[in-house]
Amino acid sequence: MSNPGEQDITPIESVSQLAALLAEGGKPSDRWRIGTEHEKFGFVRPEAAGADRPAWMPPAYSPDGIAEILADLHRQGDGGEWEGIYDKGNLIGLKGIGPERGSSVSLEPAGQFELSGAPLANLHDTAHEMARHFEAIRPISRSLGIGFAPLGFHPTASRADMPWMPKSRYAIMRAYMPKVGLLGLDMMQRTCTVQVNLDFASEADMLRKLRVSLALQPVATALFANSPFYEGRPNGFQSNRAQVWTDTDNARSGMPAAFFRPDFGFEPYVEWLLDVPMYFIVRDGVILDVAGRSLRAWMNGERQDGLEGLTPTVGDFEDHLTTAFTDVRLKRFLEMRGADAGSPEMMMAQSALWVGLLYDEAALTAADALVREQPWEAYADLRAAVPRLGLDAPWAGGSARDLARRMVDIAAQGLRARALTDAAERDERHFLDPLHEIAAGGPTQAERWLERYHGRWNGDVNRIFAEAAI
């Protein structure tokens, strides 16, 4: 979210008006871009630990913690690369300007550090952007005794161990989440993800990409599973992050059946979203708590506590879009949201997987045919199974690994076609190498960590931080 106050104040007049905003995202294929977002947990290195800074625990928002890392990034650009984003005087993010235009750095609720990458032409540029970001934060982080590890769920900390960042939006969510699910605070404080944002050409193209990617999102969850620990011990899950999402806020999460209906599109999506309870609105630069209120009722002129005398605006709808947490989220582009954060190689593989599947017509046709082999309900059942069973989850007489193998092969064909048409400038298929290995029977990240826990770590989960650090 940008600085409070930078809102479109055009009054909302109709559902079709809001659907047209989404349709504006359509663009020809030569303008399709790749935007990769990735989060990581900060941790205090043992050499910098003290009574108020336990080793391996997350750093606070403080002058010797997360706040200073943000401030240092801002200083690195000397004001020419990053514009500060503030909430009640606190620096809570950075918006890229100049060379970093289109990217942003933000803080998740417990200080998980996120880069939202710029829209880039190919995966080679994405890899360069990711490496540049890591290099930018390493010097200041090391001077503060802080490291970063991209993992799906915090492997050792309890909720009470996790700090809260000074963001008004998160204070509203913190109060509301326990009312609508048992694990919402865990989602906020103890999870990290990686996602890729991809374009569409038209409503029909959006719909096909949405259905393919939403149906196959559970397979991605299994491939990228990277959260097998809970408060220092194995938790019985391959992806505890995915398990958390099954009981967070189901009114706005998951794989809604409506998305698979034949008549689905921009207007039906807006209709669905209008029934998702609101979190907040912004007025005069202040974030107001309207959690649980109905945007639809407000639009219809019905009384809603805290909204008296206020007119719903396009900016309110755009903010509301960011509070839908489906496994694939529709904005003016599509966000793939099913994967745990992981190693840089795996985070690049996540982007490569979806680019290969969705950005080549023949690959998308093949992926669409693959998905249509089973009904939507089968994919919903798979979503429920993969957090614990991963690629061993049962699927169509075999396992999810069989589906993953076909999925990765199609993605490789799509990336090959991109290289042949010079869309990628050079071959991007090597970014899929980790997934080919896993789909062929190799261990997932979660399985590798468990092997080390029961082996050379001798049950000491803290060792994961040094080995996962970027």
Image (tube, rainbow, N blue to C red):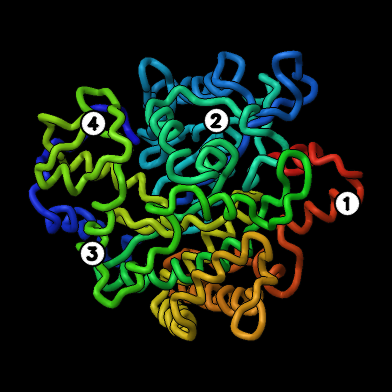
Query: What is the spatial separation of the Cα atoms under label 4 and label 3, in whole angstroms?
Result: 27 Å
Query: Residue drawn 55% across and 30% down?
Result: 111
Is residue 34 something one can see in this rendering? no
Mark found first going from the N terminus, 3 or 2: 2
Q: Position of residue 348 (x, y in %)?
A: 57, 55
What kind of residue is marked 2? Gly
In the depicted structure, whether residue 84 falls above or below residue 293: above
Quadrant of the drawing holding the N terminus: top left
Query: What is the spatial separation of the Cα atoms under label 1 and label 3, in whole angstroms?
Result: 49 Å
Quadrant of the drawing holding the C terminus: top right
Which residue position holds label 3? Answer: 268
Q: Position of residue 29 (x, y in %)?
A: 32, 67
Mark found first going from the N terminus, 4 or 3: 4
Which residue position holds label 2? Answer: 111
Q: Nearer the viewer, residue 401 or 68?
A: 401
Q: Taking 352 as reference, is 14 left or right?
A: left
Mark found first going from the N terminus, 1 or 2: 2
- Mark 2 vs mark 4, foreground winner is 2
Q: Nearer the viewer, residue 398 or 457?
A: 398
Q: Nearer the viewer, residue 123 or 339?
A: 339
User: On residue 6, which mark appears?
Assistant: 4
What kind of residue is marked 4? Glu
Q: Position of residue 373 (x, y in %)?
A: 48, 86
Q: Residues within 10 Å of mark 4 (few under 14, many from 20)?
A: few
